[in-house]
Amino acid sequence: MRRILVTGAGGQIGSELVPALRAQYGGDSVVSSDIRVPSGGTMADGRFEHVDCTHIREIEHAVRRHGIGTIYHLGALLSAVAEERPRVAWDVNMGGLYRVLEVARQHDCAVFFPSSIGAFGPTTPPTQTPQVTIQRPTTIYGITKVSGELLCDYYHHRFGLDTRGLRLPGLVSYTAPPGGGTTDYAVDIFHHAIRYRHYSCFLRADTRLDMMYMPDATRAIIELMEADAARLADRNAFNVTAMSVTPAEFAAEIRRHLSDFEIEYDVDPVRQAIADSWPEQIDDHAAREQWGWKPRYDLAAMTRDMLARLGERVHGAR
Ligand code: AKB
């Protein structure tokens, strides 16, 4: 079997996708890569390559050296940090994807591309957002995500490459922190609840967005890449969601476990504007019908698990 390469493996998704892929396909089958060299953790546990995705030679070297057949391309800037550095965001998000697709074309690799709810914009229907709809995002992050979806479709139709993608919602996880996203509050709130019983949220109490627990997200990614190609009409990229939640609802659910938890709101206008431009609740029927997507964690199940696992980590480290 040809191996798997994961770019941006040190990030929030990669930190959990790499172990999940290793569990599924065997440790030696998965090569993690990142622009940062790992100092420990799951990235350091198996094969690793230093790969800066803006350098095509580094991607090519990793693909040749390890006999790569599938690339999970996670290396990208998230929405809030992209808005601070739009030129870098374009270079990394678009330049990186283009180079990955070029190497994949030359070496006949399948490619997974993580799109986002950020690929939608203020003119998109905000509820029950259809699979195929208006995509006019107003952020540089969203623009790279829509362009990425189109570029992946182009490589599929033009060169026959097996490209597949998901429009991921905000992801909640306890292994690695997210880095500069608009939905980061949904992770921070758990850390602060456990440590301080208090959280100051940078989005308004009623900001409703799609969310998903990381075990569901890694399973969705692997199931999509395993799916029968003949059944995939949409490919780049499928709407997927597990819940549609506001900060106030997160706080109420946490309070069921930690009754003294308190939340206040100190709204960051930049991230609030990004969130306000995204849909509140997307429709993921195409994913359910074409490859059997079904989430396992709702808000209650996710909160229970997050508090238990994060609690072990925080209190275990004391
Ligand atoms: C972000 O907030 O930028 C990401 C996303 C929803 O794409 N988590």
Image: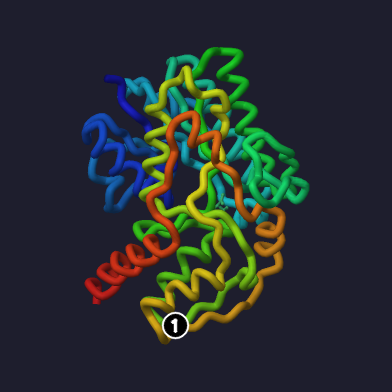
Residue 21 visible to the viewer: yes
Q: Quickly name the residue at label 1.
A: 261
Q: Is residue 16 above or below residue 64?
A: below
- Residue 283 occupies which quadrant of the picture? top right
Q: Is residue 227 left or right of residue 267?
A: left
The colour mode here is rainbow
Crowd tier of the residue under label 1, counting other residues whose Cα lies within 10 Å: few below 14, some 14–19, many 20 or above: some
Residue displayed at 38% across by 35% down: 222
Q: Quadrant of the C terminus?
A: bottom left
Can residue 36 be seen here?
no
Q: Look at the picture and state if 60 lies above or below 274.
A: above
Quarter assignment of residue 45: top left
Could you say which is closer to the camera, residue 84 or residue 308? 308
Q: Residue 150: x and y, percent?
A: 64, 28
Using the image as rendered, state which of residue 68 and residue 252 is in the foreground.
Answer: 252
309 on left or right of 290: left
Residue at coordinates 38% horizontally, 50% vertically from top-left? 296
Q: How many dots with numbers?
A: 1
The amino acid at mark 1 is: Phe
Residue pictured at 42% horizontal, 38% vertical: 221
Mark 1 vs ligand 1: CB under 8 Å? Answer: no
- The image shows residue 185 at horizontal and vertical percentages of 52, 66
Give the structural element (helix, strand or loop) at label 1: loop
Q: Is residue 43 left or right of residue 299?
A: left
Quadrant assignment for the N terminus:
top left
Note whether 21 is above or below 299 in the view shown. above
Q: Is residue 128 left or right of residue 221?
A: right
From the viewer's side, name the closer residue of 219 and 104. Answer: 219
Give x and y (percent) for residue 71: 42, 29
Coordinates of residue 48 in the picture (x, y in percent): 31, 38
Q: Residue sitting at 25 percent across and 69 percent down? A: 312
The answer to whether residue 299 is above or below residue 119 is below
